Structure formats: C-alpha cells, structure tokens
Amino acid sequence: MTELLEQARSDFERRVWGDAYERFSAADHRQPLSGEDLERLAVAAQLVGKDDVSTVMWERAHLQRLERGDIAWAVRCAFWLALGLISRGEMARGGGWLGRAQRLVQDHELDCAERGFLLIPAALGTLEGGDPSQAHGIFGKVIDIGQRFGEPDLVTLGRLGQGRALVRMGRTDDGLALLDEAMVTVTAADASPIVVGTVYCAVILVCQEAFDLRRAHEWTAALSDWCEAQPDMVPFRGQCLVHRSEFMQWHGEWQKALDEAKRARQRLSDPPGQPAIGMAFYQLGELYRLRGDFADAEAAYREASRHGREPQPGLANLRLMQGQVVAAEAAIRRVLDEPRDHVTRARTLGSCVEIMLAAGHADAAAEAAAELAAIASDVDVPVLRATAAHAAGAVSLDRGDPRAALDELRHACAAWGELQAPYERARSQLLLALCCRELGDRDTAELEADAARLTFERLGAAPDQARLRALFPATTPTAPGGLTTRQVEVLALVAAGKANREIAAELIISEHTVRRHLQNIFVRVGVSSRSAATAFAYRHGLV
C-alpha cells in the first residue's frame, strides 16, 4: 500500500494523470484514502475526464476535513466541487455547495484564503450580468486576500477576472496586459493544474473576443505545448485542439484545421458532457460550410446548438450560401436584436452586411457597416479595421460608388495580408475586381479576380469559386496551367525576352500590372523565375 501511494504521488507530481488516477483509485479500493491523497485523486479524476468520480472524491474530502475540524480546508474542497459542477451545467447543485461553503465560513467567522475563493463565483456572475466595473472591484478583493495568505491560485484567478473585466469595460490594452501577467504565473508553474488550464483557455477566449489574434495565437501555442506534455489530460486538451483548428483555418490550412477539429470533437466526446464540445462542433460547421459540404455543416451547427453553443452567425451564413436569403435574414436579425456586448456584436455585423445586401436591404446593410466602423474605431485592432473596411466597400459598391469602394477594399486587402488571412483577403479581392470592372479597368479586374480564384482553389472554397465563376465567366482559364488569355500574352512576351517595361508598352498596361500578372503566372504554373516560366511556355506550345 505504501509503495502504491508513493508511485501515485510521484505520478501526480510529474503530471502523468492517467497513471496517478489508476494508482490512487487502486489504493482507495484497498483502503479508503484520506487527506491530501483523496484530494489528489479528485484532481486527477477531473483531469482525465472522470467527472463523476471527481465529484464523489471532493465530497468525501470535504466530509473528512469537517470531521477533523479543518473547516477552512473543507470549504476549499466544497469550492472546487461546486466549480466543477457549475462548469458542467449543474447550476443548482453547484450553487448548493457554494451556499454550504459560505455558511461554514460565516458560522465559524473564518478569516482565511477560502473567503477569496468564494468571492470568485459572485464576481463572475456580476461580470456576465453586465457590470464589469463592479466585477473588477470584487476581483481586486480576491487578489488582496490571495496575496495576504500567500495563495498563488487565488491571485492568478483574481488577475484573470480583472483582465476580463477591463476588456469588457473597453480598456482592452490594460485588460490584456493583466491577462499576460496571469499567464506568466501559470507558465512559471506557480499555479495548480486546474487553475493553469482554466487560465489558458480563458485568456485565449478573451484575446479572441478582443480580436487580438497575435496574442491569441501565441498563447494557443503555449497551451498546446502544455497539453502535449500531459497527454492523459482531457478537458483542456480538447479545447486546445479547437483553438489550434481556428488558427489553422485563419492562416489558410483548412485541411489541417478540419483534422484538428475532428480530433477535438473525438477528445471532447469521451467522456460525454464536456462543455467545450459545442465549440468543436461549431468549428467543424464553419469548415464544412466554407468547403461547400453543406449537409455536414448543418449537422455540425445543430450539434453545436444542442451542446449549448450559439450556432450563429455560422448557420445564417450557411443559409445565405444555400440561397435561402429569407432564412438567413431572419436568423441574423434575431441575433442582433438580442443584447450583446459590442465586441461580440462585431462578430455578427460583418455577416449582417453581406446578408442584408443579398436581401436587397441596402439601408440596413449601411447601418450595420456604420456600427461596425464605430466599433472598429473604438477597439482599434487590425482585424476589426479590415472587417469594417470590407463591409464599407461592399456597401459603397452596392450603392453604385465603385471609386469609394475601391479605397476601402484596398485598405482591407492590405490589412488581411498583414494578418496572414488568405481567405478574407481573397474575398476582398473579389469585390475589388468588381470595382475595377465598374470603372472600366478590365486588366486590373482580371488580375484581382484571378488572384482570388487562386486562393479559393488552393483552400478548396467551393462556394466562393462558384460565385467567382458566375461574376467573371469571361476570365475562365482555358490555356495550359489554367492561364487566362491575358496571362498567355504576358508569358509569350516574357519568353520572347521582353522586359516588363517593353511588355507594358506593347500591351498598353502599367508595369505594376505586368508584375502582378507575372506573380499570378508563377503561382499557377508552379515556377519561381522568368527562365522557368519561359521553359513552361515553350514546353506547352504557348510561343
């Protein structure tokens, strides 16, 4: 028994959660555990996804501490038990345990760190109830208590809460700086495993809410490394995979993103009941939708909804792609009519502009674009500025003002390029092509349309490819390598030894346009130099 417990404790310290759980469980069957070993079993059970076992162990630990007169520690066990129940949606039962813990503190007039832990649920409720300023103050008390009693978990959770509150208050830079401070604590291994996972996931979500993609990507990589070092861990590892999938999608690695989302779904499905499973299904829905797998997308969105994840705006975007404009409009209006903070609302407004334009409601689209621009000005982050510029360009183009649209869409394309977001950039390039065509600049229109087509083809964005073909049927490639007529002309002159200036003069276009044509030609035929492109031209009889 002694040897088994020593092995279990060693597994726990090394964070080999599966072995720790098995050995502590085996020891508990031989002789009921007590004290810290029982609490270690509760933690290990939670981290390997055995939530029911974890609940029972925390209950036993709580009762043992009470019997021994260790009231403060009994309160702490009740707190972790309640937090686990609430995170799994058992609000009444979790609230009951919090009430029991509060009564113990009051009845025994305890001045202890546990008072700080019990402030956290109240602070979170205040924050979600729409009063971030008051929540910030409560989290400040949590930090004070944690520092007074030397509790790094408490200080870390307090800083996490204050950071979230500051972001909700519009003080994004201050909030994110505080979240970085909390992350430094967890990466330095000063916090317990459950707190570390909680902080990682919460910080990444807040970064996404604040549209700080660079920070979110950085912390997602750190979370991935932390999870990889603990392969037995279930709850945070699954959520980590969802975040990784989102960033792979953002950077144009759609197949990898789909594989990662499927892994997340599998990981979060066993054992059942894990809250983040809705995130995994929604991410699958997004990827299926973008690829044109509409039946799979709809099924994934429905599963996301069944597991508590709002399926919008993804489902509304799906309806638009399916040509069900009325259904898309009804869904997006319903979401926008519900009270939401301005950052969450911004995620829906871009979809709203596109759907309202498709429905013929130009004024509603303009209102949504204006609101999005105001939020982008207030929050001032690159991704929001790019989204707002794209929306404003789409509205101006719809109103018959392609010159105004051109300026906005060029800003959007530049921003998407800096953010390394190829799909979003291609969507803006397509609108840019329409603007150039309206202004009579057919060469540039063809360039932008072809650049968008290349991206859509590489990503496998079937619905966008279909839309582009409908808008630009005359530019459908017919030559070897998928080159357009104008690209064949440029390539023939390159093969004849002409410089860019000479090609521009002969075709009556600018040198910049020649360079853009060459960039697209190189990508299409898979070469990186003029000599290789010339060889391709001779090999395929283009000269």
Image (spheres, grey):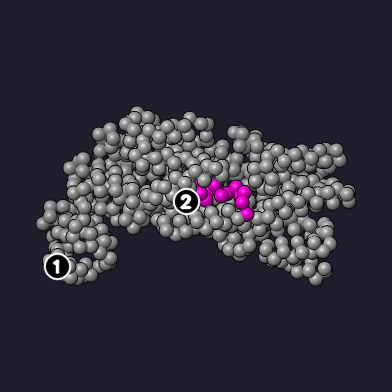
SS assignment at label 2: helix
Q: Residues within 10 Å of mark 2 (few under 14, many from 20)?
A: many
Q: Is residue 275 magenta?
A: yes
- Under mark 2, the amino acid is Leu
Identify the image quadrant of residue 28. bottom right
Magenta segment boundaries in residue numbering: 271-283
Task: Compare residues 425 and 474 and report the one nearer the observer.
Answer: 474
Quarter of the picture containing the C terminus is bottom left
The residue indicated by pointer 2 is 284
Q: Is 135 placed left or right of 254 in the picture?
A: right
Q: Residue at x 51, y 49 (%)?
A: 281
Task: Compare residues 228 and 127 and report the one nearer the observer.
Answer: 228
Judge whether 271 appears above or below 492 on screen: above
Picture coordinates of residue 317 (x, y %)?
40, 41
SS assignment at label 1: loop
Q: Residue at x 59, y 43 (%)?
A: 164
Picture coordinates of residue 371 (x, y %)?
42, 33
Identify the image quadrant of residue 525. bottom left
Picture coordinates of residue 369 (x, y %)?
38, 35
Quarter of the picture containing the N terminus is bottom right
- Under mark 1, the amino acid is Gly
Q: Which sits earlier in the primary sequence, circle 1 or circle 2?
A: 2
Judge whether 370 appears above or below 514 on screen: above
The residue indicated by pointer 1 is 541
Q: Does residue 230 show up?
A: yes
Q: Residues within 10 Å of mark 1 (few under 14, many from 20)?
A: few
